[in-house]
Image (spheres, grey):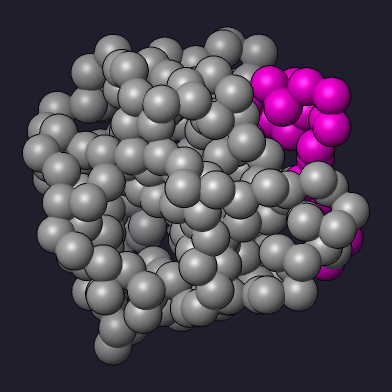
Amino acid sequence: MNRMRHGFVDLDDPTDLDIRYIRLLAQVLGSATSGPIDTLYLGAGSFGLPRYRQAVEPHGTDTVFEIDDELVDINRSELGLVTSQSLSVRIGDARLLVADAPDGQFDAVVGDAFGGSSVPWHLTTTEMLEQVRRVLRHGGLYAMNLIDAGSAPFARSEAATIREVFGHVAVIVAPEGIRDGIDTNIILVGSADPIEGLRVDPEDGRILSSAEVVSWIGGADVLTDDFAPVDQLIR
């Protein structure tokens, strides 16, 4: 879709993750959390990550908010998706569904919603992230996948926004970094507590040091409901 590959499912082995950014998100959840956790996913894709989590940690719960009911139907009819009490899906706009969710319901939230190559603007702002923080338990984390290139103005603004709301942000870039003219998935991780124990496969990504994060964000604007020109920021 939209000239990009958005999902992959190995019907025989849900732990086979063939897309780099999904592997990174799986590594973030695995290294920064321990044991069964309750995870919320904003955006379904091919359900690759929740299927993976169900396979490696079946005692956790995985809840998916997805706006496109046809996408969910395709996952069921073509990709063997079976929902249950531990892997559930709700249809609707993620921002509205998060606003209706109880306080402290999840240990982790994963943002992986796209309209084309950009994250829908209303899922990027301080007002949205305050709702995400509200539904997280103490010590919980928010992991977000986004796409940018070159000087990455959108990614830097989103990192600034996550830091503004959560207090702490980690940045994971591709092993070769961010290059002009080449769309690159960047993973941002936010938490109200210092982010410790985060590890990723060096073949999949590189975690910027604290000093690098401060320099990389620089004076990037914080995104709000009154100012979130996401499509214009992406290079």
- Residue 100's place in the image compared with 179, above or below, is below
Q: In this view, does 173 lie above or below 43?
A: above
Image quadrant for the C terminus?
A: bottom right
- In the image, 118 versus 25, the foreground residue is 25
Give me the residue at 34% from left, 24% from top: 36
**Residue 111 in the image, given as x and y percentages of width and height:** 46, 53
* Left or right, residue 62 beside residue 234: left
At a point 14% along the width and 33% down the height, the residue shown is 139
109 or 123: nearer the viewer: 109
Q: How many labels does the image show?
A: 0
The answer to whether residue 100 is left or right of residue 73 is left
Region of the chain picked out in magenta, as a range = 2-24
Q: Is residue 92 left or right of residue 105?
A: right
Can residue 16 be seen here?
yes
* Residue 157 image offset from top left, x and y in percent: 36, 59
Q: Is residue 152 above or below residue 37?
A: below
Q: Main structural element of the magenta stretch: helix, strand or loop? A: loop
Query: Is 21 contained in the magenta span?
Result: yes
**Residue positioned most to the bottom:** 226
- Which residue is drawn at the image coordinates 26% and 74% (left, top)? 99
Which residue is located at x 22 percent, y 26 percent? 195
Quadrant showing the N terminus: bottom right
Residue 3: % across, % down: 87, 60
Q: Position of residue 24 (x, y in %)?
A: 55, 28
Examine the rendering and report whether any part of residue 234 can be seen: no
Q: Quadrant of residue 174?
A: top right
Query: Which residue is more in the foreground, 199 or 186?
Result: 199
> As rendered, which of 179 and 12 lies closer to the eye?
12
